[in-house]
Each structure stands twice: as structure tokens, then as C-alpha cells.
Image (cartoon, rainbow, N blue to C red):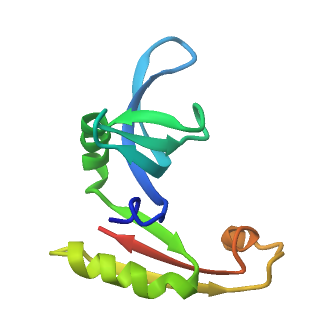
Amino acid sequence: TFLAEGFPVLVERGVYERDFNGVVTWMGHYQVLTGYNDQADYFLAQDSYTTPNLQVDSQELSNGWRSFNYAYIVAYPMEREAEVMNILGRTLTKNRIISRRWTVPAMTSSPRKISSFFLPILTAVLIW
């Protein structure tokens, strides 16, 4: 799938955290999944709220991700589009796909084009 082929996947999931008053609260939170370990049954997540290379138990990820209907975004360079479409063809059932392509200058002042700071040509696919 995407991670096995080297494509990071952005997911939103519900997590329980202690707030500033020590009360446990629920919040939606984005994480970028970059790997997994089948034997230990965890995903490797890049998490700006806690730490890079965070090990997230696969059942914990699934439970929190369910709150957002398992939607995910895959960003990839255009030259790898055929690989992404091949993976989607193997895994897609009743999911919906929205594809958006950005071809913008590498530096821009528009906050809407923040992705351009990472790749001058970026394609993202949102699946839900």
C-alpha cells in the first residue's frame, strides 16, 4: 500500500489528551504516517504536537481515525502519479476521491499554497 511504496499518508484522528487544567479532553489531530511495523503492530507517525517518529498502536490509530471516517490524504510528485493510481485501483472500493494539482512557484506569500514550499509541483489525493 502507500506506506510500503514510500508514500507518506496524512490522517486525522481523535485523541484524548490532558488540557492545561489536567482534564482529559478529546480533540481532532493530524498526523503524517511514514511507516509501520507488522510484527510489533504499530504505525510510525510524524506528530508536530508530541514528537517525530511516534509509535502509534494500530488499534489505537484505527479507533481514533474512525471518528473521521478513515479519510486520508496522499501527497506525491506528479512523476509518481501512475504508482498512486495503481495503488488506489487495488484498494479502492466505495471510497470517494478528490484530486487537486498545484503547479505554483516554489516560493509564494499565499498561505493557501503552503504546499509549494515543499514541492514546486504537488498532487494530493483525498480519499474518504
Q: Is residue 80 above or below residue 50?
A: below
Q: Nearer the viewer, residue 21 or 118?
A: 118
Residue 36 screen position, x and y as percent? 38, 46
Residue 48 screen position, x and y as percent? 61, 40
Residue 121 screen position, x and y as percent? 66, 83
Instruction: Kindly give the residue lying farthest to the top in the view shown.
Output: 22
Instruction: Kindly give the residue lying farthest to the left in the view shown.
Output: 93
Q: Is residue 11 above or below residue 42?
A: below
At 38% from the left edge and 60% from the top edge, which residue is drawn? 4
Identify the image quadrant of the N terminus: bottom left
Instruction: Kindly give the residue lying farthest to the front in the view shown.
Output: 39
Q: Is residue 38 above or below residue 122?
A: above
Q: Nearer the viewer, residue 105 or 55?
A: 55
At 80% from the left edge and 78% from the top edge, which residue is drawn? 106
At 48% from the left edge and 63% from the top edge, which residue is drawn? 6
Identify the image quadrant of the C terminus: bottom left
Q: Nearer the viewer, residue 29 or 87?
A: 87
Q: Nearer the viewer, residue 79 or 32?
A: 79
Q: Left or right of 127: which side holds 22? A: right
Q: Is residue 8 above or below residue 49?
A: below
**How many dots with numbers?**
0
Q: Left or right of 62: which side holds 46? A: right
Which corner quadrant of the image does residue 46 belong to?
top right
Q: Left or right of 106: which side holds 4? A: left
Residue 113 screen position, x and y as percent? 69, 74
At 38% from the left edge and 62% from the top edge, which residue is drawn? 72
